[in-house]
Amino acid sequence: MSLLPFKDLPPYRKRSFVSPESVLSSLDVILPLFDRLESQATAISSPAELEQWLLDCSEVSAAMDEESSRRYIAMSCHTDNPEAEKAYLEFVEKVEPELKPRQFKLAQIYLENSFRKDLPQQRYAIFDRSTALHVELYRPENIPLETEEAKIGQQYQKLAGSLTVQFRGEEKTLVQMGKFLEETDRSLRKEAWELVSTRRIQEAEKFEDLFEKLFIIREQIAKNAGFQNYRDYSFRARGRFDYTPEDCVAFQKAIETEVVPVLKELHEERKRQMKLESVRPWDLAVDPENRPPLRPFEQVEDMVSGSDRIFQQVDKDLAYQFQKMRQLQLLDLGNRKGKAPGGYQSTLAESRVPFIFMNAVGQQRDVETMLHEAGHAFHAFAAQEDDLYAYRSAPIEFCEVASMSMELLGNQYLEQFYPAPEAKRARRDHLEGIVEIFPWIATVDAFQHWIYSHPGHTRTQRTAAWIDLMDRFGGNVDWTGFEHIKAALWHRQLHIFLYPFYYIEYGIAQLGALQVWANSKKNPVDALNKYKQGLKLGGSRPLPELFEAAGCKFDFSSETVKPLLALLQKELALP
């Protein structure tokens, strides 16, 4: 597909079941593969033949996954391109709905096979658990609902990616406007902040309408699957075997108790340093000592080269992997009009290589995002050798340990972008950002818990719930005169629209990453080796074992939060 930033890539393993010439882009190519898999399953006569059948299933799944990923990447890189949009929606609307019942059938066949009990238990325990869950939750009537949900999600991305403002005679994307919030001129910051906020508010009704359509669909999906509400369904569907909604509520409480006071102290320190009567929303990104904004690079290629040098210092193997991504053009990093917001790493499942997407504009946050997404990429490389498709990806809670740990490990070498004093300042900004993100994670997570446990709520009630949570977790920021902006701030959080209940993972993983970082302060070589060993396991072990392999504890109660916050306070020299 010409709209992709990278060229065609060969499969990591030579195809043995799928024809090498086949492109899995249409049902007339894909469905015969499922026919063959179903037919061959009836002739399985040994555990070894069952394992080979699973590898054949994996080959088909990876080829289809890569076709889907390619279309998603092209669409998100060019949300304003009709060809990319059409190709993506065609796969979502016409191909994926037809595949779901066939995938369900293969899962049933596997679970019912008499030789399954003879397979190595430790090797297949997680696969068996996930396959059984797939069969448990499958409902044919949910297929068209899931298709519609994906289509509305694409509309959200298209809307969010299209927003621009006219700022001092130039058209700017909202991402590009973020740079002006770091300027020392307070009136300039306020002007930029108001312009962006007003632009988002102009689309508030559209965002609300899109969300309400999604809410109705999700409630019906849960009801069809026999659940009282979408929260309970989502926890089950996300395979959260190792924690419960109650654990998430305990996490929210731990953040409120342990982190919010530190956040308030940071806001008070900022107010004192800047000699302000109160900290306003446009005062949060500027340097409190009135120093010029951190500008780590001018051109995106400079960011890539600097990141490469950081990885050289972190680990030679990781640096080699990043260089491979550069060579294969598996990076689309600069911001532009028509590009979807945010950043992500997507694994091309058959090629078994990662692709990184982001919107860099020359800020320190871009460097952090680069390190973050590279951590995901290193995870994909680490699990590359496992031929069981399902094990080449891990639960999100651990995937984010991979990325957030790399932020912390890589930030030790920010002198590749700055002189020593500015590198130290950038490291402090990053640690402050961790303190700030925990309450935001708790806010987003608690909001989703409220939404989906209050069926039939009104828009007014939903807004009131959001405001209450902002007051609970928002620190000491003065929103006077801009309460309407505060009330709609959740519209910018794409996870609420696209990936319901996917946000607590960042909090769980950040605690894991802080433990990896703490370990690296004591023994950097051992900490890095354990980190890499954890990544190598992919999704083959339960979450607690993945965390343990990486040298950290799977726990997000106050018992874990408190000492890690103490470490952050020490690094930030806070009382």
Image (spheres, helix red, strand yellow):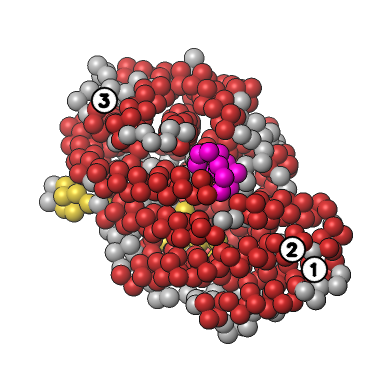
Q: Position of residue 126 (x, y in %)?
A: 73, 51
> Is residue 246 shown left or right of residue 476?
right
Residue depth check, mark 2 versus mark 3: number of the one nearer the observer: 2
Q: Residue at x 60, y 51 (%)?
A: 137
Q: Earlier in the sequence, mark 2 or mark 1?
A: 1
Residue at image mark 2: 110
What amino acid is at disc 2? Tyr
What range is drawn magenta here? 225-237
What amino acid is at disc 1? Leu
Q: Earlier in the sequence, mark 2 or mark 3?
A: 2
Residue at image mark 1: 50
Q: Residue at x 50, y 39 (%)?
A: 229
Residue depth check, mark 2 versus mark 1: number of the one nearer the observer: 2
Of 174 and 206, the residue lying toward us: 206
Circles 2 and 1: CB atoms closer than 8 Å: yes
Residue depth check, mark 1 versus mark 3: number of the one nearer the observer: 1
Q: Is residue 232 above or below residue 217?
A: above
Q: Earlier in the sequence, mark 1 or mark 3?
A: 1
What amino acid is at disc 3? Trp
In this view, the residue farthest toward the top is: 575
Residue at image mark 3: 479
Count of numbered badges drawn on the protein: 3
Of 442 and 232, the residue lying toward us: 232
